[in-house]
Amino acid sequence: QVQLVESGGGSVQAGGSLRLSCAASGYTYSTFHMGWFRQAPGKEREGVAAIYTGGGSTYYADSVKGRFTISQDNAKNTLYLQMNSLKPEDTAMYYCAASVGWIAYARRGVQTEYDYWGQGTQVTVSS
């Protein structure tokens, strides 16, 4: 089992920045990929960014490329999402996820590929 706890959400104005954190515990050595997803009211959950825990290879959704950066601190078992130049359309609940199997690059933004989920942290961006 892997437990994930997100933090760092909040309310910011458009153009601002936030850094989300995801603390992992349990059998973290079993994870291959970790990712960030988001879900806005009335919309489906979408993949935002993902990282291969063994080598740092990253994936980003087109909507966040150049603005968001995913990173990890293996010593702290913590995943981060640095979000810059935030837009109102980034408003959503953000979830951390982990997989225990290898995910092909094209599927790293697909929620069904992930096995463990956190409870989420809310990000609200006002115009």
Image (cartoon, grey):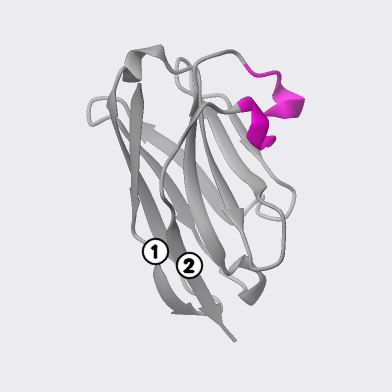
**Residue 29 at x, y percent in the picture:** 34, 14
Residue 14 screen position, x and y as percent: 56, 79
How packed mark 2 is, by other alpha carbons closer than 10 Å (few <14, some 14-19, many 20 or more), is: many
Return the residue at label 1.
9
Q: Is residue 26 left or right of residue 94?
A: left
Q: Label 1 amino acid?
A: Gly
Residue 90 at what x, y percent from top left?
61, 66
Image quarter of the C terminus: bottom right
Image quadrant assignment for residue 17: bottom left
Q: Amino acid at mark 2?
A: Val
Q: Residues within 10 Å of mark 1 (few under 14, many from 20)?
A: some
What is the span of residues highlighted in magenta in the rendered image? 103-113
Query: Residue visible at 71% across and 23% down?
Result: 105
Say if the magenta span includes residue 14. Answer: no
Residue 33, image x, y percentages: 52, 24
Determine the residue positioned at 52% across, 60% down.
93
Reply above or below: 2 against 32. below
Secondary structure at numbered mark 1: loop
Give 51 or 122, whichever is nearer the viewer: 122
Give the left or right position of residue 116, taking residue 75 as reference.
right
Position of the N terminus, as image quadrant, is top left
Q: Nearer the viewer, residue 32 or 60?
A: 32
Q: Say if the magenta span includes residue 108.
A: yes
* Res. 123 mark: 2
Q: Is residue 117 above or below residue 19?
A: above
Circle number at residue 55: none
Q: Secondary structure at mark 2?
A: strand
